[in-house]
Image: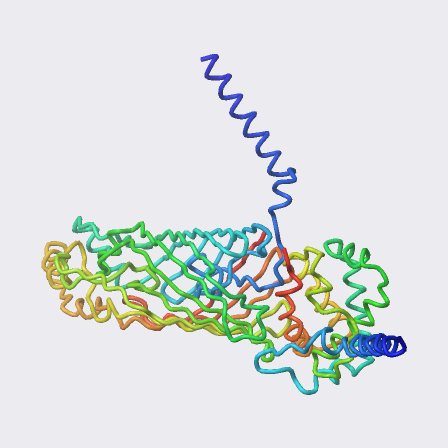
Amino acid sequence: MKRLHKSGLRTLQCAAILAAGLASGSAWAGIYNDGKVLLTGGVFTVDGAGGGGAVPWATISGYETRDGINGSAGFTYVNLPALQVSFYGVNVGFFDRLELSYVDSRLSLNLPNLQTVALLADTAGLNTGTDSWNSTLGMQTYGAKLRLFGDAVYTSDSWIPQVSLGGLYKDNRNKALIHTLGADKTKDYEIYLAATKVLFPISTLVNVTARYTSANEDGLTGFGYCNDAARNDCHNKRKVRAEVSIAHLVAKNTAIGGEWQQHGDNLDHRSVNIAGLNPTGLLDALQPVLGSVNLGGLPDKLKQRKEGDWYDLFMAYAPNKHISFTVAYLMFGNISVAPDQNGFYFSTHLTF
Amino acid sequence: MKFRKSLVLGAGLAMLAAAAARPALAGEQKTKPIMGISKSAVADFGGAYGVHKWVESLFYYIMLDNRINYIFKEFGNVDRQIALNTQLEQMVLGGANNYQGASMSAAHADLGITMTQFNAVVEAAYNACERDEIKYYTCNDLIAALAPFTRVIVTK
């Protein structure tokens, strides 16, 4: 017991010395860097990577230059008619070369049609992953981005952009609900190649990204699709999708712009699968609960809409190098069974 | 003997002439930003006087910034640095090439300038534009024109 206590103390001592060293040591002071020009690292995307709102750029997040390391934390809140999404995350940029990121996202669904089914399913004792009041889809995204070549800002006498290769690994927590929505996989990877260039004469940053993915709604509703409710005929075909982000700087600390992110059609017109049953099967299963109530129209109501590409218009403001704010108007189109999900986006990016 | 003397004199004169012609050759060349520089760039800066005033503001902000001021102080003769910078800025903005200083690579070769320090000067440049009421877009013309020098100025 005494020995244990001693070793514990020693560990504490070591930790304290290490912490003190990190806080005040010249080693850290030498490696910490915030030398990038304002806004040139981009803001915090929903994937955690540095970029616009949804589209990752080739720039490395944080204000570090090739001389050091810089980190940041971001929070984003999206408010759409039928759902709300929060993103919390951190990322670190190493020597303007490598970026590592992590984001935790929570999507709350407030869909009366899904909730009604959830209520009925609960009553019938079926596990659907839905909650009759508030269903939440959680996802963790781990990312890494490597700058391959180019300098987006300073090679103003060449058309060669800054090009980076990135990878994202996304893992959904509410597996039952992802399967209910008809997706094949709850976790998968995405790979993207981004090219970014600042065009000084028009004071505009242009970014083009190609993403190799099979994601439904950025992975928030899973990856791929299943043809049958029993999940025997599932497919996860990744394709290259295009993304564009344009940011016009009206001042050194203010950017306005727009984005477009191409989405797939994995879940278009597919019915949700409740507990391995399609809606007709579900109706049969619910008969004991429903009794003589006629819900013959239910299958139609539970058919998912055509997934829309994401568009947004944004304004980013960075009063200094420690904080920036982004507000955007999102046009997400149809998300699952919810039509016309357009609304506002607010994001804060804290840089150390 | 007399022939030899005149030969030496001639060679000396030729060398002098070469030295006089040197600033235009070995000094510095205009950069060539993609999409070009606005034709009215020098005028937008307030002409030659405006560019000079802007460089004075630039040095004002450089001297306030502890990350870089010591480099410029060590170099000495700030008035001369301001004069040379004025010539350089006028040239890259599309004005005449009257630059009399050393090339950017020669002038910065031994200084070990980092990207962070280069960016600090860029920040000072934007501050100078604000102080001189020069529009952000006009300021970007100058940054675009100077940016290619990053390759030779930043050596660390």
Which residue in the rendered view is the most extreme toward the front?
Answer: B1
Quarter containing the N terminus of chain A: top left
Q: Where is residue B8 in the image (x, y as percent from the top left)?
A: 84, 74
In the picture, measured across the screen, residue A238 lies left or right of residue A296, that is right
In the picture, measured across the screen, residue A351 lies left or right of residue B92, that is left
For residue B140, which quarter of the picture? bottom right
Q: Does residue B87 show up? A: no
Q: Where is residue A108 in the image (x, y as percent from the top left)?
A: 36, 57
In the picture, measured across the screen, residue B97 lies left or right of residue A31, that is right
Q: Residue at x 50, y 70 (%)?
A: A161
Tally of numbered tags: 0
Q: How is the image coloured?
A: rainbow
Q: Does residue A16 show up? A: yes
Which residue in the rendered view is the most extreme toward the top?
Answer: A2
Which residue in the rendered view is the most extreme toward the bottom?
Answer: B39
Q: Which of B140 and B80 is in front in this view?
A: B80
Q: Where is residue A82 in the image (x, y as percent from the top left)?
A: 36, 65
Q: Which of A331 and A63 is in front in this view?
A: A63
For residue A157, which quarter of the picture? bottom right
Q: Where is residue A189 in the image (x, y as percent from the top left)?
A: 32, 56
Q: Residue at x 43, y 65 (%)?
A: A54
